[in-house]
Amino acid sequence: MKLEMTGIQKSFNQTPALLPTDLTLEHGKFTTLLGPSGCGKTTLLRMLAGLEQPDAGEIRADGQCIYSAAKRIDIPTHKRNLGMVFQDFALWPHMTVYENVAFGLKAGKQKSDLRQKVNEALGMVRLQGMEDRYPHQLSGGQQQRVAFARAVAVRPGVILFDEPLSALDAVLREEMRIEMMSLVRDMGLTALYVTHDQIEAMSMSDEIVVMQKGRILQKGSPETIYSAPSDPYVASFIGKSNWLTPNQSMVRPEHVTWNKTGHDDLCYPGTVLSVSYVGERYEVRVQMEGLGVWTAYMNQRMCVGERVQLYVAPERICRMDGYDHPSMKQNEAIAVAY
Ligand SMILES: Nc1ncnc2c1ncn2[C@@H]1O[C@H](COP(=O)(O)OP(=O)(O)OP(=O)(O)O)[C@@H](O)[C@H]1O
């Protein structure tokens, strides 16, 4: 299912939670809303689900209007052909695993072959044999699998995830991340996933939508978001960034070299602050002169306090709004610690 949102916005008690926003979720793509707490991710997801009413704008599913403030169209949640998985699993505590999964099918009136559909969904998440257990008799990972089975059993056109793994421990979170992503892809579902975890976003998504303060800053593939951030906030939020001019030009640690490699390379002096072995190489933090602290990688151990020269090839510099030229580094005025 393709979902298109145009001009949707929402305020709570006159305080904007989401500024006017356009967003398209392409059919079969895994899109992640990434941003800090309170930036409007959940509000956007809930409006898509029909759980929150936008103040303005329109939402279309496969070209058909499912919400329009102007035309007074508001298709209810259960008719929007979507599945949802939440952080707290939202399972019915008094129902067994079987009943929890069957509940969505019954509510959606998909009653034919009920047992087969439930078994199929439980098979997908490897929970056969646990049909008669209650949620409290399951681990966190198993509970989330039931929630996922319940969401996909109805064969929705789109699946919405709101921080579904944040209640799980780190190891299980990684395991479930791979499992959920594979299942969504195998089923060819369109997915919208809300998280504030960059690693989750980078490892699961076809598209990442970075949000801040109720607006979308950038939408793109993980590769684009990392290599060509359009905004300083995006650059700082995802991966490590070394600033050549505050808020304007940045270089990633893997593009900083210790020896001059080309005649155009720019040279920056600094002092080693810390050295950590990160497997086959060292992550070195360097206090740069007038440029704050940079991170770079090196193949051999350095000494703390050692004076160094770091080099950057101009084509490796990522430029954002207001950027002028690498020669700006000569300018005292830009020598602000970031
Ligand atoms: N029902 C509500 N009533 C009043 N304010 C709300 C309501 N829901 C959300 N907000 C406010 O809207 C803003 C956006 O909230 P939202 O839950 O969408 O953010 P989020 O990015 O999902 O954050 P988190 O990662 O913490 O869940 C916040 O300032 C929040 O306090």
Image (cartoon, rainbow, N blue to C red):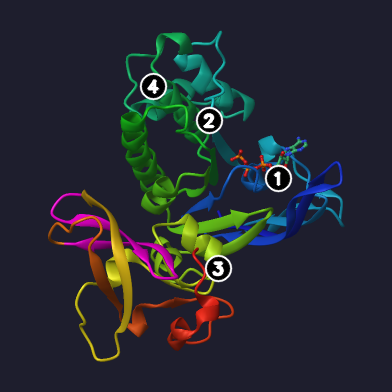
- Look at the image and give the residue range highlighted in magenta: 278-298
**Residue type highlighted by circle 1:** Met
Q: Write down the residue under mark 2.
A: 87
Query: Would residue 32 be found to the left or right of residue 273 on screen?
Result: right
Q: CA distance from mark 2 to mark 3?
A: 29 Å
Q: Determine contact: label 2, label 3, CB under 8 Å.
A: no
Counting from the top left corner in percent of width and height, residue 253 is at 32, 65
Q: Earlier in the sequence, mark 4 or mark 2?
A: 2
Amino acid type of the residue tagged 2 in the rendering: Gln
Q: Position of residue 217 (x, y in %)?
A: 60, 63
Residue placed under numbered mark 4 in the picture: 142
Magenta highlight on residue 302: no
Q: According to the image, label 3 marks what residue?
A: 231
* Badge 4 or badge 3: first in the primary sequence: 4
Q: Secondary structure at mark 1?
A: helix
From mark 4 to mark 2, how far is it between C-alphas?
A: 13 Å
| Vertical side of 169 occupied by 71: above or below | below
Asked if the residue under mark 3 is in contact with the one under mark 4, i.e. CB atoms within 8 Å, the reply is no
